[in-house]
């Protein structure tokens, strides 16, 4: 049924730490490995070793660059101009993205067949592939690009939160986690009940200021993202102060390095070149 | 958004079929005339061809019957249910005209109402998507209804205005001109909005949540080649030429049909020009509907770099 449940007993989801993720794509690969032989039809690839390989993946990593001060060219009479360059110290953020298991999931309500649904017991959004006609409307309704049509089977694929792992009593209890969480070598992905304010993931979100992606779309995503931590300043003397006239100004060096600097500079005035 | 030919053909052809059904259902056309009989068959054929086209883009069309089940939440499901319901009065009226030379105005109004509701559902499939700001407006609904009625009116007028009409051809010519101007006026409002609305309230900063750190730019895509998402939703080919395409759509869809209709009104021996005007209108509508998809930005494009590009300083 494609009506959304008013509430769900649990809100199972992921918390993804953008500070910790190193962009290794291990979660991408382990997701594909588990899910191509798990819930539903395989995740097919087309032309995998050819010139233009494509395939369905449930988890992808984008890499973004953030510049603190964009330089804008402002054409006359216009408020915001085009970005023509960047200034300041850049940051690179690796950004894993899979289904956010939204509370107000538009992919569920647009489904004409009832194939797309949200579970009352844990809030996981799933596709019943036997009912899916492959119209693609749910993928259109998803702002996050969490759904991909499988070109071989003609049905919509999406993250199941490894529903066939997390309740799987054949597995050791420690392994009853989504494959991406279990495999992450950096510990950047966390799984738990975000509906329970006392759960470890909820605490993490509270401590680190976890946020929603595109809150303006009104989907109320369950998955949360943790922001990159503030950069710690480099030690004194390691870098010239911002705006220093002379990039080789070593006047702030002290201790052993300061002594070497002074000795090599001819022992005259501290900081002279 | 990627403009799929099957969806463009479906919405344009079935829209014209429903438009023609609205004209006929509101009591126009003598049910005994051969032209009216052909008109009923044409309306039903256009709707049926359109619906068949719409199943071409499905991954599993053999399960299409399931799409009638979720009418409580899904506009696509509502469209399917309404399309089937509309066939009942339309089919009955067509049979009455074909074999009994009769028309029933109660059935006619039911058919016209259901036709409008079906076209409106089609429009709302697009209009209800928050992810595509260009579509997420009531102007989308207005566009689909207006285009449907105008193409239907032109079809009626072109082939049947003179023989089957209960009014004079000149009145229908002027009515069609008014419809054409209103329709393309609505399309113009839609297009101006669509081309400035971009990604709406969303940005690469809100999509990543990293706006607090500065200006966000895509450094690396998830993988080197395209994927389902970029093929389906990050369509860029048309953007470069959209001005040109839009002007062509206006000339074919508005200017040519209006000139044809004016000549046909004052020089009845040039009545054949209405056929050319209608053909031209259809070409314009196809082009316009192609643009409807091509100019629309989907929020997911923000994860693939959006429209931002580093342009070298002049």
Image: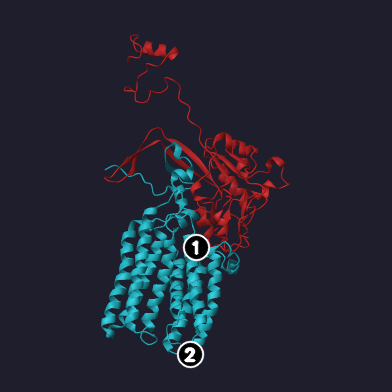
Disc nearer the start of the sequence (2/1): 2
**Residue A254 sits in quarter:** top left
Residue B125 is tagged as 1
* Chain assigned red: A
Left/right placement of residue A130 relative to residue B232 reads right
- Nearer to us of marks 2 and 1 is 2
Image quarter hosting the N terminus of chain A: bottom right
Crowd rating for badge 1 (residues with CA inside 10 Å; few <14, some 14–19, many 20+): many
Query: Furthest residue to the front?
Result: B106
Residue B114 locus on image (x, y percent): 51, 73
- Note whether residue B294 is visible: yes
Image point 47% across, 65% down: which residue?
A: B123
Chain of the residue on which disc 1 is drawn: B
Residue A147 locus on image (x, y percent): 54, 54
- Note whether residue B3 is visible: no
Q: What hue represents chain B?
A: cyan
Helix, strand or loop under label 1 = helix
Crowd rating for badge 2 (residues with CA inside 10 Å; few <14, some 14–19, many 20+): some
Residue A71 is tagged as none
Helix, strand or loop under label 2 = loop
**Residue A203 sits in quarter:** top right
Give yes or no for contact between labels 2 and 1 (Cβ–Cβ under 8 Å): no
Q: Mark 2 points at which residue?
A: B101
The CA span between labels 2 and 1 is: 37 Å
């Amino acid at each position: 049924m494609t009506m959304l449940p008013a509430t769900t007993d649990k809100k199972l989801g992921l918390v993804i730490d953008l500070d910790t993720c190193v962009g290794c794509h291990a979660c991408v690969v382990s997701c594909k490995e588990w899910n191509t032989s798990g819930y539903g039809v395989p995740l097919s690839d087309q032309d995998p070793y050819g010139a233009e390989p494509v395939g369905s993946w449930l988890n992808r990593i984008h890499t973004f660059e953030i510049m603190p001060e964009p330089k804008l060219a402002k054409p006359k009479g216009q408020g915001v101009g085009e970005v023509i360059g960047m200034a300041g110290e850049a940051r690179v953020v690796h950004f894993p993205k899979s289904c956010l298991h939204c509370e107000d999931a538009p992919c569920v309500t647009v489904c004409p067949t009832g194939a797309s649904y949200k579970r009352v017991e844990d809030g996981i959004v799933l596709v019943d592939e036997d009912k899916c006609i492959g119209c693609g409307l749910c993928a259109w309704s998803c702002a996050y690009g969490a759904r991909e049509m499988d070109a071989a089977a003609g049905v919509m694929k999406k993250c199941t939160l490894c529903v066939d792992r997390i309740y799987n009593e054949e597995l050791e209890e420690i392994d009853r986690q989504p494959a991406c969480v279990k495999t992450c070598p950096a510990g950047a992905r966390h799984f738990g009940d975000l509906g329970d304010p006392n759960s470890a993931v909820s605490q993490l979100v509270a401590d680190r200021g976890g946020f929603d992606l595109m809150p303006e779309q009104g989907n109320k995503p369950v998955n949360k993202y943790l922001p990159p931590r503030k950069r710690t300043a480099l030690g004194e003397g390691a870098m010239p102060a911002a705006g220093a006239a002379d990039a080789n100004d070593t006047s702030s060096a002290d201790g052993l390095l300061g002594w070497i600097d002074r000795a090599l500079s001819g022992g005259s005035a501290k900081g002279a070149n | 958004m990627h403009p799929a030919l099957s969806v463009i053909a479906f919405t344009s052809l079935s829209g014209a079929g429903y438009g023609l059904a609205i004209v006929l259902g509101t009591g126009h056309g003598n049910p005994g005339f051969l032209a009216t009989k052909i008109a009923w068959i044409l309306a039903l054929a256009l709707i049926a061809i359109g619906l068949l086209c719409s199943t071409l883009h499905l991954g599993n069309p053999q399960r299409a019957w399931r799409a009638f089940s979720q009418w409580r939440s899904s506009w696509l499901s509502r469209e399917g249910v309404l399309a089937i319901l509309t066939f009942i009065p339309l089919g009955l009226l067509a049979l009455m005209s074909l074999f009994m030379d009769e028309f029933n105005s109660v059935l006619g109004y039911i058919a016209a109402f259901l036709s409008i509701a079906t076209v409106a559902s089609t429009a709302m499939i697009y209009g209800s998507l928050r992810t595509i700001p260009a579509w997420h407006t009531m102007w989308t609904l207005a566009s689909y209804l207006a285009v449907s009625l105008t193409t239907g009116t032109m079809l009626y007028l072109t082939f049947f205005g003179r023989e089957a009409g209960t009014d004079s051809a000149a009145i229908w010519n002027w009515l069609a001109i008014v419809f054409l101007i209103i329709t393309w006026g609505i399309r113009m409002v839609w297009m101006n909005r669509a081309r400035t609305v971009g990604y709406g309230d969303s940005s690469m900063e809100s999509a990543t949540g990293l706006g607090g750190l500065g200006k966000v730019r895509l450094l690396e895509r998830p993988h080197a080649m395209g994927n389902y998402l970029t093929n389906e939703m990050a369509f860029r080919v048309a953007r470069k030429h959209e001005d040109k395409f839009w002007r062509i759509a206006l000339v074919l869809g508005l200017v040519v049909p209006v000139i044809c209709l004016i000549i046909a009104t004052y020089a009845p021996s040039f009545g054949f020009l209405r056929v050319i005007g209608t053909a031209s209108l259809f070409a314009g509508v196809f082009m316009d509907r192609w643009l409807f998809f091509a100019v629309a930005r989907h929020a997911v494009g923000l994860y693939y770099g959006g429209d931002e590009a580093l342009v070298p300083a002049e």
